[in-house]
Image (tube, helix red, strand yellow):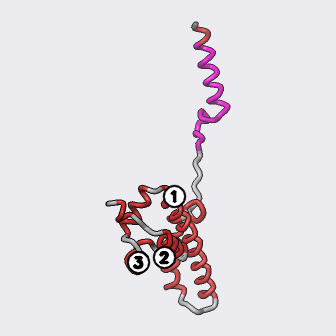
Amino acid sequence: MSDEEMTISADTFERLLTEVAMGRGVKTICRDDPGMPHYTTVTKRCQNDPEFAEALAQAREMQAAYLFDDVVENLERIRDGKIEAKSATAWMNGIKMIAEKLAARKYGPRVSNDHTSSDGSMSPKESGKAVLDALSRKHADN
């Protein structure tokens, strides 16, 4: 892809970021909005321009918050009887999945790693003692 094909004006880029932050996907924006670059132009630009990629990543985090707010609004509509819970649930599950992918640290499942061993041999006290014992043996042999 030539430099000319990767050129995206500041105004166009600002419009793209705004649309993403308002919940729309890059692919949809590029396909449906007049004057927007092709989707591959955006992806190539992200690969070659870290500042461009970072700005788009920030817009996607805002997009996740926007979509999360949509879920809250639909919960209120369900509560008020304005939409059927069954159809809204399917829609909200999709939005939740998207938000988890867009901003995993904020909306994704919490993951914790347990680094203990069942026999205690990996505990800091035991492993530290093992290291000291090994060093003592090494220096005793010298």
Q: Residue at x 60, y 63 (%)?
A: 106
Cα distance between the residues tagged 1 and 3 = 22 Å
Q: Secondary structure at mark 2?
A: loop
Cα distance between the residues tagged 2 and 1 = 21 Å
Farthest right residue in view: 125
Q: Nearer the viewer, mark 2 or mark 1?
A: 1
Mark 1 nearby-residue class (10 Å; few <14, some 14–19, many ≥20): few
Residue beneath disc 3: 35
Q: Secondary structure at mark 3?
A: loop
Q: Residue at x 54, y 86 (%)?
A: 85
Q: Position of residue 54 (x, y in %)?
A: 52, 59
Residue beneath disc 2: 24
Say whether residue 15 is magenta.
no
Mark 3 nearby-residue class (10 Å; few <14, some 14–19, many ≥20): few
Q: Position of residue 89 (x, y in %)?
A: 52, 80
Relative depth, front residue between 73 and 4 = 4
Q: Where, by quadrant of the figure, is residue 33 drawn?
A: bottom left
**Can residue 97 be seen in this snapshot?**
no
Residue type, numbered disc 2: Arg
Q: Residue at x 55, y 61 (%)?
A: 104
Q: Position of residue 30 (x, y in %)?
A: 40, 74
Q: Kindly report the secondary structure that dominates the magenta region of the rendered protein.
A: helix
Q: Where, by quadrant of the figure, is residue 43 drawn?
A: bottom left
Residue type, numbered disc 1: Glu
Relative depth, front residue between 97 and 5 = 5
Cα distance between the residues tagged 2 and 3 = 16 Å
**Span shown in magenta:** 115-138
Callout count: 3
Residue beneath disc 1: 51
**Can residue 52 be seen in this snapshot?**
yes
Q: Secondary structure at mark 1?
A: helix
15, above or below 135, in the image: below
